[in-house]
Amino acid sequence: MHNLARSCLSWQLKMSIRNKGLPWLSYNNHRLLQAQQTSQEQTTTLASANFSTWLPLRPYVKGNPTVTLKQVQHNSLSNISRTDVVRHSSNVPLTRERYQSHVKRGPFAVLSDLDISSFEKILPGRVVTDRDELLYSNTDWLKTVRGESRVLLKPKTTEEVSAIVKYCSDRNLAINPQGGNTGMVGGSVPVFDEVIISTQLMNKVISLDTVSGILVCQSGCILDNLYKHVEEHGLTMPVDLGARGSCHIGGNVATNAGGIHVLRYGSLHGSVLGIEAVLPDGQILDCLSTLRKDNTGYDLKQLFIGSEGTLGIITGVSILCPQQPQAVSVGYLACESFSQILEVFKACRAHLGEVLSAFEFMDSQSLALIKENMNIENPLPEYPFYVLVECSGSNGRHDEEKLMSLLQLVIDDNIAVDGTIATDLTKVKNIWRLREACPEALMFDGYCYKYDISLPLSVFYQLVEDMRARLKDRVIRVVAYGHVGDGNLHLNITAKEYNEETMALIEPFIYDWVAKYRGSVSAEHGLGFKKKNFIYHSKTPTAVALMALIKKTVDPKGIMNPYKLFPDELRT
């Protein structure tokens, strides 16, 4: 059959199935149905083989099916008790104990009752000293590091942040800025007893220019809330990640968060037009420009994008919002080798062009993970690799036809072995759930050794294979997924608990391997506390020395987010 005719027949079949209320079929199932002219009963059976428990089922914490990890993470007490949250975090070892061999408290003052009284005068009713509530803010999302801060401050304005920081500077009290506390490298929680300054209540949208698409807001705005706000005006946010329901835009900027749409919109270094920040001495830096062009000296905002709170606390952000796509289509493909994934990526860039907005991959271990730990089914049969391709544009029918044509092309050319397409919003979300559930599902295994790296695509998956061969049965699993579109691999190793011998097998091996191929030890999560001593695997001593000089100049007392980003010892 001619390719075009076969494509049209496939489309007719798919629309017929959709109209009858049956589940979606994979491309190979379409072709099988065409060839065998199966009965309606057979059709239903064949569809159910792939979609009998189609997504999403409610994620659960083992032992309590009503508790989701996000509820535990964000202390949402509507469905769980406060005791559940405390118990979940209190089991995490203190950072100073787990890393006692190479972490030492800096020469900072110790918080006193007089300090608490002074903070109460600045922030009446917004000074938290309750140990249970502090436990959440002291513990990272992955439950791998835990500090011992005695106070959590919740300012509402930049002026309040300024007053707090100035007081801390005068007293030489170390500060830990905190947004949504969704970081992966221990950068958002104290190492010792730093004063936590949360942007949680700094959640106001200041302005939105619907003509230029420029949004100005406080740094504590939750990313998903910003999505909802700008979508009312036909716009969207240029950054999207799995934690968007809880992460703050200020934290996104401070860590230069990447996410799934860097392929389409680029990084925040290009989208952020201006920032407002409080410097370590309490001064307010107002660079909250809404101009797309401003060539008057140093672009100071760039220093704060990716600075991880070490130069100051971002309090306001000006960001350029793209036009909201009118339609989104998602293709989900299966491949038998990673080299096939790269061929699919080349085909996508050639045939989808400007509508290609995301290109994600997952290995079979990732799908086994979400099946075992979250009861989420894979809509395709078992294969070594899977690809999620997203198209978004202004003409849904056009995008869908291009995606269907691509699916047929890559299967006919034996680049992919099976696939399915979704354009209905619910089914699009369900397919994305496969990818976005991976980080959450990892936590059920116990302890997760988590790595976020950039590598040339030619050696992208080789590291995963080398790590499996190195660790063998010492761990539960080695799982890989990530953003092929921008060369970002998420490599995760799970075990029942943290083990020094296992860590010694992983590090520095993994970072030496990345450095060998001129990759980056952190693609989008930052360095934080966990990766700071491996900065030289990606940056030269000259570059790190210049960064340290900037830090020393801006923060001479070193009070702003200490123990993060910079290595314990600088090389000369």
Image: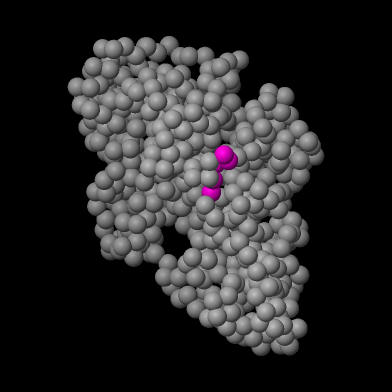
Residue 416 location (% of width, % of height): 72, 66
Residue 197 location (% of width, % of height): 34, 29
Residue 208 in view (yes/no): yes
At horizontal 42% and vertical 35% (from top left) the residue drawn is: 81
The count of marks equals 0
**Which corner quadrant holds the C terminus?**
top right
Residue 552 location (% of width, % of height): 42, 22
Magenta span has 481? no
From the viewer's perspective, is 216 left or right of 110? Answer: left
At horizontal 26% and vertical 58% (from top left) the residue drawn is: 209
Range of residues picked out in magenta: 59-63
- State the image quarter where residue 288 is shown: top left
From what the image shows, is residue 78 above or below residue 155? below
From what the image shows, is residue 79 above or below residue 334? above
Residue 569 location (% of width, % of height): 56, 19
Magenta span has 61? yes
Name the colouring of the figure: one colour
At horizontal 28% and vertical 35% (from top left) the residue drawn is: 285
Residue toward you, 9 or 522: 9
From the viewer's perspective, is 308 left or right of 206? Answer: right
Tell me which secondary structure the magenta stretch mostly adopts: loop
From what the image shows, is residue 529 above or below residue 289? above
Residue toward you, 113 or 445: 445
At horizontal 33% and vertical 22% (from top left) the residue drawn is: 129
From the viewer's perspective, is 88 left or right of 493? Answer: left
From what the image shows, is residue 450 above or below residue 21? above
Residue 528 in view (yes/no): no
**Which corner quadrant holds the N terminus?**
bottom right
